[in-house]
Image (tube, helix red, strand yellow):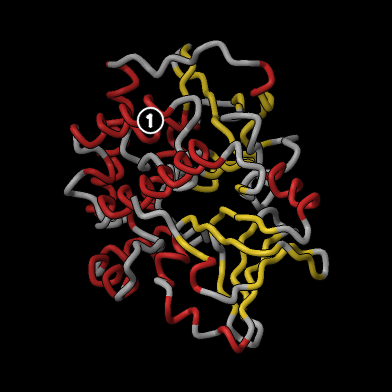
Amino acid sequence: MNLKSFYIISRIYFLSFLFLFTSVPVAISQTDSNLIIGEFKVTKVVDGDTFRFDKLDGSARLQFLDTEETFKDDNAAQKTDELRKNWDKYYKTLRDTSKYPVKADSPFGYDSWQWAKEFMKDVDYVRLEKDDLVREKDIFNRWLAYMIVIKNGKEINYNIEVVRQGISPYFNKYGNSKRFHNEFVAAQNYAKENKLGIWSDTVQKYPDYDERLTWWDFRAKQLEDFDSEHKENKYYFNISEINEYKRLENYLGQEVIIFGSIGELLQNRFPYLMTIPVTKENRFEIVIFEEHAGILNEINLQDILENYVYVMGKLEKRKDRYQIILRDKNQIWMDKD
């Protein structure tokens, strides 16, 4: 590790421990027992927001965190030091002309991983909790969880602490926290005001966090708007919720409006498919036959692919997959307010 790398990591450690000894950790209120997944032993710190747990039924993703990516092999430190030499140019080339920020292995991603290992080295067991009872797992069947740890005899919500230390932004790309939204906002403001981690001018991290926050806040508002305007309409379906996806069975052959986030556009052959992932095994398909392929030139495809969209049409099912055939550009739209 070179001197610059050592300085950056040491600075992160110092700020973290300074916080632990000079301020009051986020208070953990009494938790509804239905929201508790259980207590588990941490077996591995994979990176800043990914952990493995002994005897957990499946894996877990820590909610509302998005630490930067990092090399994880035996040569991770060496690769990171090489990346530090030309980081700004590397990221600029990687993003190229993309309207939206991209993810990449970064120097700060590695630093975040080291911070997490140091933070957790005296923690044996943690408590995992859910945000709500509506969406307990993600599309890869991973538990969506908060990780509650005990440091210096006090309970700390690791998710909020990571944001407070500037190790991660408040990641609300898939909606705001139901339980701790205000705490996450306050934690992020604290990190910004004190120029910690990603908000510092001295670390090599993604240079476009302002854009990321604007984008994620927009998506979070899309979800809030759907709930406030359409949640009670039985012909509208937010299929990011598994129970809503299951409800489709009763509406085959009827006109419905699907709300979701497109995962990929498949254009290798006709018909083209835009897919909305629901679970690892299930996806919703928006079908575009060759005679309607021109629709893709009439819509703002990049925005459509990066945000939540509405799709209207007759609900059909083919090979156990629900689908709507797109024949007109007005069948698909995105709220822009």
Residue 97 seen by the camera: yes
- Please provide percent x and percent y for residue 159: 46, 32
Relative to 82, 266 lies left or right: right
Name the foreground residue: 173 vs 165: 173
- The quarter of the rendered structure image containing the N terminus is bottom left
| Residue drawn at (80%, 49%) of the image | 250
| Residue drawn at (50%, 58%) of the image | 309
Secondary structure state at the residue bearing disc 1? helix
The residue wearing badge 1 is 184
Please name the amino acid that badge 1 sits on: Phe
| Residue drawn at (33%, 31%) of the image | 185
Relative to 262, 301 lies left or right: left
Relative to 127, 206 lies left or right: left
| Residue drawn at (61%, 41%) of the image | 233
Residue 113 seen by the camera: no
In the rendered image, the vertical position of residue 99 relative to residue 57, given as above or below: below
- Please provide percent x and percent y for residue 102: 38, 63
In the rendered image, the vertical position of residue 78 relative to residue 122, given as above or below: below
